[in-house]
Amino acid sequence: QVQVVESGGGLVQAGGSLRLSCAASGSTFSSMIIGWYRQAPGKQRELVATISSLGSLNYADSVKGRFTISVDNAKNTVYLQMDSLKPEDTGVYYCNDIRPSFAVNWGQGTQVTVSS
């Protein structure tokens, strides 16, 4: 059974940086289209960045130019480098395959809190 585990969150001041990690077990990212999602308090989960096995990258307008998604196939880990963080980036961050038929059970996520 494929599982994903997110890590790397924390408390940071506005303008700071964090790097999130998404580690997979039971499968490899080479067969997945991975998205990083975030869920702010009281809001629905939103997709902020995706990376495909062909290296195609996409970002939500709200994070474009500040976030970078990447993959290390040797470590079977997808990263989300987050720079110039803003208070509105606060939320729980999750990773998963963006295709509903390939999505796995959601992990616990990792909390990101950006203070002003």
Image (cartoon, grey):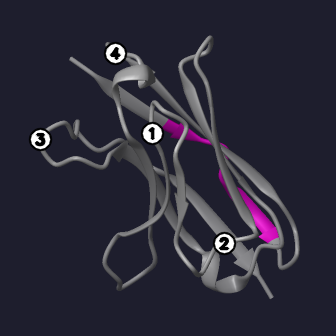
Any magenta on residue 26?
no
Counting residues from the N terminus, which is met first, the one under dot 1 or under dot 4? 4
Q: CA distance from mark 1 to mark 4?
A: 15 Å
Circle 4: residue type: Ser
Q: Residues within 10 Å of mark 4 (few under 14, many from 20)?
A: few
Q: Name the residue type under label 1.
A: Ser
Q: Which label's residue is closer to the chain start, 3 or 2?
A: 2
Q: In the rendering, which numbered label is found on residue 64?
A: 2
Badge 1, how many Cα within 10 Å: few under 14, some, many 20+?
A: some
Say which quadrant the N terminus sits in.
Answer: top left
The residue identified by callout 1 is: 52
Marks 3 and 1: which is nearer the front? 1
Residue 101 disc label: 3
Disc 2 + disc 1, Cβ < 8 Å: no
The numbered dot on residue 27 is 4
Quadrant into which the C terminus falls: bottom right
Tell me, yes or no, whether the two marked residues, 3 and 4, touch with CB atoms within 8 Å.
no
Side of 25 where 85 appears, left or right = right
CA gap, disc 3 and disc 1: 16 Å
The image quarter containing residue 7 is top right
